[in-house]
């Protein structure tokens, strides 16, 4: 496995892979089974797999979230080596952004006025900036993104479509802990009690789905069901529970088989997200 610490080193490594289909998995590190599932899919589908680890300052609207974001480069490199990754790209912020603030701004109001976009102003602008930049640097054939970050995946697919970026974007299923909590690097910041109370998020989404399967489709009623379950635990605070069309991400007046229920919760001071497609089997 080759490790490239800047764009110049990466170009040398990519030169060696010329002619091979390249699968790319962008991450912010502190890797877990969710990330590894993307890497395994890339390994199945592509001849070579490139993984980036870069905690992108442009997408953090909250400075303390950036500072406390968990990092463990040596542990990550061990996991990537074991998976048989070909190249790891570990750029510094100076290498990626040799300027104070970018002059260029990417925005997608239609897909960011709702869900996380509403509560994290600028987050998806910074995310698009880094993903498009990484696509230009790595020039992969395919790129893999988790459905845990459902809105992110939708935005990237639309960006690639509108700008004719020559990359196939592939969505990968959300991976959960055995007790149902969506895997996330941020879970490591929870206390033991917080970690237990966070399991209520998935329980709430499952109860929403069960209620929907039993005939309930009123959004207000379904929202209350979810909120009650999550906030029975004192460390949990709901930021949003939203019901949107799973393709357009527009809020829906009543739930149907094309509805996605998505939630963002603060457990202690840690922001956690999760989602469930109501038309899918769980
Ligand atoms: P991050 O390091 O949080 O930026 O995530 C990097 C990639 O891994 C993104 O495409 C995420 O959607 C994906 N990912 C993170 N957690 C999970 C999970 N639990 N299941 C599936 N994909 C995930």
Image: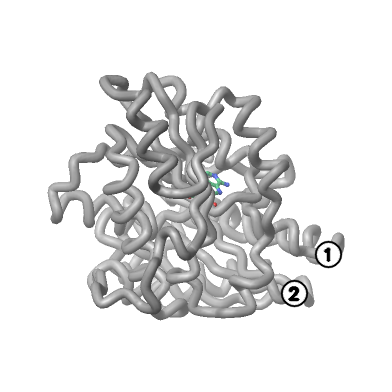
The mark total stands at 2
Of the image marks 1 and 2, the number of the one nearer the N terminus: 1
Is residue 214 shown to the viewer in this render? no
**Is the CB atom of the residue marked by disc 2 within 8 angstroms of ligand 1's nearest atom?**
no
Secondary structure category for the residue under label 1: loop
Give me the disc on residue 126. Answer: none
Q: Where residue 50 sits in the image (x, y, percent)?
A: 44, 34
Residue 136 left/right relative to 41: left
Q: Nearer the viewer, residue 27 or 196?
A: 27
Which residue matches tag 2? 268
Q: Residue at x 31, y 36 (%)?
A: 140
Q: Residue at x 72, y 40 (%)?
A: 178
Q: Where residue 65 sits in the image (x, y, percent)?
A: 61, 73
* Residue contact between numbered discs 1 and 2, judged by CB atoms under 8 Å: yes
Q: Nearer the viewer, residue 211 or 275?
A: 275
Give me the disc on residue 191. Answer: 1
Q: Residue at x 65, y 72 (%)?
A: 67
Mark 2 crowdedness (10 Å alpha carbons): few <14, some 14-19, many ≥20 = some
Q: Quadrant of the C terminus?
A: top right
Determine the CA span between mark 1 and mark 2: 8 Å
In the depicted structure, whether residue 272 falls above or below residue 183: below
């Amino acid at each position: 496995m080759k490790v490239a610490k800047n764009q110049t080193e990466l170009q040398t490594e990519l030169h060696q892979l010329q002619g091979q289909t390249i699968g790319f998995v962008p991450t912010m590190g502190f890797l877990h089974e969710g990330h590894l599932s993307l890497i395994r899919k890339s390994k199945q589908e592509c001849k070579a797999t490139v993984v980036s680890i870069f905690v992108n300052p442009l997408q953090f609207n909250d400075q303390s979230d950036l500072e406390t974001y968990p990092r463990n480069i040596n542990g990550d490199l061990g996991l990537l080596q074991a998976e048989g990754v070909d190249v790891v790209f570990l750029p510094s912020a100076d290498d990626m952004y040799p300027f104070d603030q970018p002059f260029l701004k990417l925005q997608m109001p239609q897909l960011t006025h709702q869900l996380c976009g509403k509560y994290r102003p600028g987050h998806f602008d910074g995310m698009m900036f880094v993903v498009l930049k990484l696509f230009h640097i790595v020039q992969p054939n395919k790129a893999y993104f988790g459905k845990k970050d459902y809105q992110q995946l939708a935005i990237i697919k639309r960006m690639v479509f509108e700008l004719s970026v020559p990359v196939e974007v592939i969505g990968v299923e959300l991976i959960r802990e055995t007790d149902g909590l969506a895997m996330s690097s941020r879970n490591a910041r929870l206390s033991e009690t917080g970690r237990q109370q966070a399991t209520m998020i998935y329980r709430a989404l499952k109860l929403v789905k069960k209620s929907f399967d039993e005939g309930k489709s009123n959004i207000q009623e379904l929202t209350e069901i979810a909120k009650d379950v999550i906030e029975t635990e004192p460390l949990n605070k709901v930021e949003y529970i939203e019901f949107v069309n799973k393709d357009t991400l527009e809020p829906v007046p009543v739930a149907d088989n094309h509805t996605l229920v998505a939630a963002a919760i603060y457990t202690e001071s840690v922001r956690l997200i999760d989602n469930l497609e109501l038309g899918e089997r769980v």
